[in-house]
Image: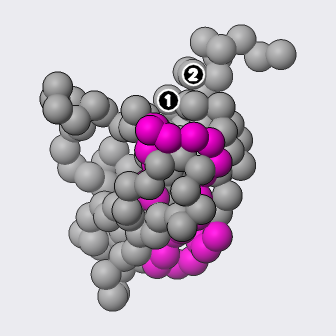
Amino acid sequence: MIAPQRIALGLAALALGSGLAAASGAAAVASPATPAPAAAPADASAPTPFGSKCKVWEKTVNRFSGWCDGRGPASYRATIACSGGGGEHQGQWRWLGDRRGSTAWCDPGHFRVASRFQFMT
């Protein structure tokens, strides 16, 4: 079994290497009213920070969607970073276990460069 510290370091390195932080152009700042979302593992079928798994429905050149197993009130949403100054777009917040899923997409003329699920307690 891999030590939890190694997993956390590996996930942090994957999140930084994915380009999402660079694509957003701004650092995430947590406020008391809105806790900072946790990054999902690079492999969407890997366990989430809450121990559930996510299923990807669609991962195309300009869309990313799926759902995450588990129980609320913790939430998830799809996030996509787009090329050519297209920015970062987020899907709908859903409770863990809500199989309606979340979908994020790029505007016309922009393409997906990175995608992931975000989580919030």
Residue drawn at (40%, 32%) of the image:
121
Vertical relation: 64 (above or below) 7: below
Q: In front here: 23 or 29?
A: 29
> For numbered disc 2, what is the local secondary structure?
helix
Q: In front here: 117 or 84?
A: 117
Vertical relation: 28 (above or below) 116: above
- Residue 68 placed where, x, y %? 60, 51
Question: The magenta stretch spans which residues?
Answer: 57-79
Res 12 label? 1
State how far apart marks 2 and 1 are (Cα). Answer: 6 Å
Q: Residue furthest bottom?
A: 108
Residue drawn at (52%, 78%) of the image:
61
Q: Which residue is mark 2?
A: 8
Res 78 label? none
Question: Callout 2 environment at 10 Å: few (<14), some (14 to 19), or many (20+)?
Answer: few
Asked if labels 1 and 2 touch by Cβ distance under 8 angstroms, the answer is: yes
Q: Is residue 4 left or right of residue 113?
A: right
Q: Amino acid at mark 2?
A: Ala
Residue 92 is one of the magenta-drawn residues: no
> For numbered disc 1, what is the local secondary structure?
helix
Vertical relation: 89 (above or below) 8: below
Q: Is residue 17 left or right of residue 20?
A: right
Residue drawn at (60%, 37%) of the image:
48
Q: In front here: 63 or 99?
A: 99
Q: Residue furthest right?
A: 1
Q: Amino acid at mark 1?
A: Ala
